[in-house]
């Protein structure tokens, strides 16, 4: 089995409804990935163990989705030099605005690249991860270019 190059982590199984879009996008580009439920506050030891082994296992980018007081991406970024892409999830009574602000408003020094709330953010985080890998992997660059071409070709010229 090919080792995963991108890790998709999420604070709860309930985040999977949105975060599976990241896995789908990566799979469509043949980028090996893994998806795991890891909560910064409910499973802190699991998070520590995951981060400690990530780089050594060949992970190059981490996508972290969480809702509410979303600190998963920030805590992960604090413990690794790998790029961390944060996806705010609209799982709270505040519809993701809380997660968006928590993820995007990192104090200077520890960056988290923050994407849109929910499924489209998860999809774009995956495509951004692909763009990062494409810088040193011509095969992924070609697949990304083809993905864009197919996307453009699927847009009709007229609405009806
Ligand atoms: C966050 O709390 C998770 O990322 C999730 O978005 C939210 C709610 O989790 P559950 O109560 O559905 O497990 O930590």
Image (cartoon, rainbow, N blue to C red):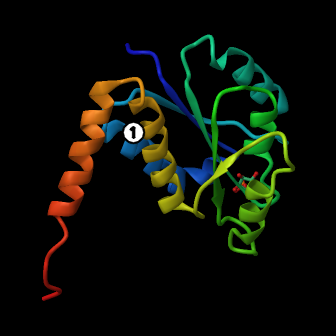
Give the camera-side residue of 35 and 159. 159
Split into quadrants, the picture shows ligand 1 in the one at bottom right
Around disc 1, counting alpha carbons within 10 Å, would you say few (fewer than 14), some (14 to 19), or many (20 or more)? many
Q: Farthest residue toward the bottom?
A: 160
Residue 123 in the image: x percent, y percent? 45, 53
Q: How many marks?
A: 1
Is residue 43 visible to us here? Answer: no
Relative to residue 59, is residue 128 drawn left or right? left
Ligand 1 contact, mark 1 (Cβ < 8 Å): no
In the rendered view, would you say 87 is above or below 101? above
Residue designated by label 1: 26
Above or below: residue 85 compared with residue 36? below
Report whether residue 111 is seen: yes
> Residue at horizontal 48%, vertical 24%?
5
Answer left or right for 52 relative to 126: right
Coordinates of residue 156 in the picture (x, y in percent): 15, 75
Q: Quadrant of the C terminus?
A: bottom left
In the image, residue 56 lies at what x, y percent?
62, 11
What's the residue at 63%, 34% (across, down)?
83
- Camera-side residue of 153 and 109: 109
For the residue pair 159 and 1, the one nearer the viewer reads as: 159
Decide: is 155 above or below 149.
Answer: below
């Amino acid at each position: 089995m090919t080792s995963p190059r991108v890790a998709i982590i999420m604070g709860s199984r309930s985040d999977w409804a949105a975060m599976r879009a990241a896995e789908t996008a990566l799979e469509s580009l043949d980028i090996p990935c893994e998806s795991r439920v890891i909560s910064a506050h409910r499973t802190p030891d699991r998070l520590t163990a995951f981060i400690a082994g990530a780089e050594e296992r060949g992970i190059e980018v981490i996508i972290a989705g969480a809702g509410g007081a979303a600190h998963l991406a920030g805590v992960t970024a604090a413990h690794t030099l790998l790029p961390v892409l944060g996806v705010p999830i609209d799982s709270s009574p505040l519809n993701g605005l809380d997660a968006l602000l928590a993820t995007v408003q990192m104090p200077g020094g520890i960056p988290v690249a923050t994407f849109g709330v929910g499924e489209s953010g998860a999809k774009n985080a995956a495509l951004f991860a692909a763009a990062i890998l494409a810088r040193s992997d011509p095969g992924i660059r070609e697949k990304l270019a083809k993905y864009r071409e197919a996307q453009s070709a699927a847009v009709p010229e007229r609405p009806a």
